[in-house]
Amino acid sequence: MAHLQAAGETAAERATGRDRQQAKIVLDDVSRHIIEQLQQDGRRSYAAIGKAVGLSEAAVRQRVQRLIDAGAMQIVAVTDPMSLGFRMQTMIGIRCNGDPQRIADLLAGMEAIDYVVITAGSFDLLIEVVCEDDDHLLEILGEVRSLPGVTMTETFVYLKLRKQTYHWGTR
C-alpha cells in the first residue's frame, strides 16, 4: 500500500486531498473487507475485525493505519446537526471568474464550511454549511460573497434530509 504524501503536507491537506494529485489506491480483498467492517460499525474492535478477515489484531491495526495515512479512509463520528442545535443546513452554489481552485482553497480554509467541491455545470463550486440560524447563514454568505473572484451565489436551504449514507463500499 503506497503512502501518498507531499513534503510538508499537513493532516488537513491529506484529509481534503489538497496539494497532491488524486491517485487511485489499489486495495486487496482483505483491505476491502476491513473497510466494509468499519463502515458497518466504526467502533468495531481490531480483534473482531481480525477474526472476520483472518488477520491478527496487530495486522488489522497496521492496515487501518496505512489506509488512513494514504487518505483512503477516515474514521469519524457522524453527527446529526439538527439534534446538536444547528437549525439549518445549506448547499451554496458559487459562480466565479478566474481560477476556481484558488477560490476553493480559500473556502476550504473557512471553518464554517464543511464541504467544498469544484464542479462542472451551472456552478463552478458547491459548498455545504451547517448554521445555527439565519444570522449565521447571512454572516457566512457575506464572507463567501466578499472573496475576490466570486461573482454569484445561490443558496439551497435543506428542508429535510431524507438520506445520507457513507456505505458506497470499496468496489
Image (cartoon, rainbow, N blue to C red):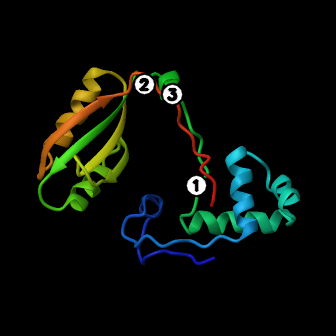
| Residue that numbered label 2 is attached to | 86
Q: Position of residue 151 (x, y in %)?
A: 11, 46
Q: In the figure, is residue 16 to the left or right of 51?
A: left
Q: Closest to the observer: 148 or 25?
A: 25
Left or right position of 33 against 77:
right
Q: Secondary structure at mark 3?
A: loop
Q: How many marks?
A: 3
| Three-letter amino acid code at the position of disc 1 | Gln
Q: Is residue 23 above or below residue 105?
A: below
* Viewer-closest of 111 and 22: 22
| Residue located at (62% from left, 46% from top) | 167
Disc 3 packing (10 Å; few <14; some 14–19; many ≥20): few
Residue shown at 28% from the left, 21% from the top = 134
**Rendered position, 130 above or below 94:** above
Mark 2–mark 1 Cα distance, whole angstroms, equals: 24 Å
Residue 74, which numbered label?
A: 1
